[in-house]
Each structure stands twice: as structure tokens, then as C-alpha cells.
Amino acid sequence: MALINLSQVSKRFIKGKETITIFDHLDFAVPEGDFVALMGPSGSGKTTLLNLLGAIDRPTSGEISFDGQRIDNLGDGQLAHWRSTHVGFIFQFYNLMPMLTAAQNVELPLLLTKLNRARRRQNVDAALKVVELPDRSSHYPREMSGGQQQRVAIARAIVSDPQLLLCDEPTGDLDRTTANEILSMLQLLNKDLGKTIVMVTHDPEAAKFATRTLHLDKGKFVDRDLAA
């Protein structure tokens, strides 16, 4: 069964007097427990697709469903709650708050929940253990390497135990050795913890860590393996 499904989704932007079509009646399904690498040239629609999957953006037309429930027609408040519960985001440049410690950065998504302080702390400690950084909880981003900062970002993404992880060039700013460590960690989250992962990457070596690789070009899949 597909965890998330796009059915006949179109996405258009208005730029001045011009209408730019990114997707035109796109179908796309991600089975639960999948690890998909999305590749393609700049401007092919990869990041737009991630934004649609994470409900950061809405389709112009078509339907998006998650675990059998439509989400494209939810209100803004409902979508914000849905994202905080079901989706974790991992970015290329970590997006950590420089004035907060690693633990405080990881805790940020939990501030939107009803968990008390003690339970939030338990979840933060558990997430930092998963990414093998329990000894860096009181360190600030400036005191950590790029790889360590990305591990903190991964901990932040999984601290609320989401089903879906969306990764936008998660190793694009890292050297090969550190990138492979991060990708191995994503594999562990997929295989051992059952996280469904969709990862945008330009790196063929990074794509090898995924279960399957799909190629986008001008808003279309050029080799399709979309079995739900």
C-alpha cells in the first residue's frame, strides 16, 4: 500500500504574465517503507515534488493522500499539525539555529506538541542516541563539524517519530566519507526503524544507498518504477 500518493497532480506558478507549469497530471506513489532517490537536472521539479509530498506547497489541481487520507484539501492549521506529526525534513545546509544547543535544536519540533518538558527531553535524548551524538547535546552548531551538524538535523527530523522523511540534498555540503556516514544512517532509519524516505540528490553515489532511483526531467519521470 502506498504511504503517500499523488493522483493527477498539476502544479503551476504565475510569474508576471507567464504561467510556468512544473507538473501536469503527475501520478506518483511511495510505498510504506520505501527509500526513493530522486534525480534529475536543475529545474526538473525535484524540490517542488518534495514540497508537495511534505504539504509545504499545495497542488494546483489533483489529489494528494497520505495513508489513505486526502491532505491536499486540509486547512493551513490542519496541515501544520499533520506535518509536525507525520513528516521530518532534512536539508543540505542543516538549518540549525546557531544560538541553540544541539539538544535545543532537536527539541524544536516537539514545542508544537503537548508533550511536557520531561517527555520532550526523553525524546531528544533518544534521537541523539540514534544519530550517535549523545555527548554533543550541549554543544552549539559552531562547535560541531558539518557531519555532526547534519546528524543533529537528522535527530531533529526523527524526534517526533514521523513516518516520512524528506531529504533535500542531505549530503551536498559534505565530503565523500562523511556523506557516506550520513547515507548509511538514513539506510539504518529505513531498514531498522521502518522510515519511508524520499531523497533528492544530484549524486549517483548517494542514490546507491536508496532502494530505487527515479529520474525527473521537465516535470516527468523518464524511467518509471512507481509500483505502489
Image (spheres, rainbow, N blue to C red):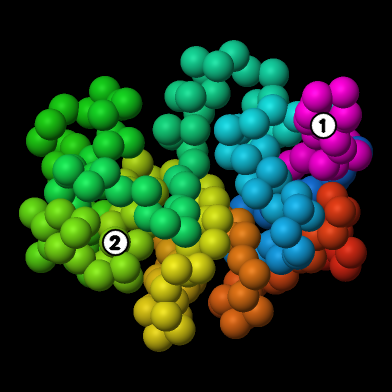
Confirm whether the magenta stretch covers residue 185: no
- Placement of 222 over or under 64, stated as above or below: below
Label 2 – label 1 distance at C-alpha: 35 Å
Q: Which residues are magenta?
A: 1-24
Residue 5 placement, left or right of 175: right
Residue on which disc 1 sits: 12
Residue in front for this viewpoint, 8 or 177: 177
On the question of residue 190 being in view, the answer is no
- Placement of 195 over or under 118, stated as above or below: below
The disc, 2 or 1, on the residue closer to the chain's N-terminal end is 1
Furthest-front residue in this view: 16
Residue in front for this viewpoint, 104 or 161: 104
Identified at 69% across, 18% down, the residue is 73
For residue 142, which quarter of the picture? bottom left
* Residue 148 place in picture, x, y as percent: 27, 67
Identified at 62% across, 66% down, the residue is 201
Identify the amino acid type marked 1. Answer: Arg
Confirm whether the magenta stretch covers residue 22: yes
Identify the amino acid type marked 2. Answer: Gln
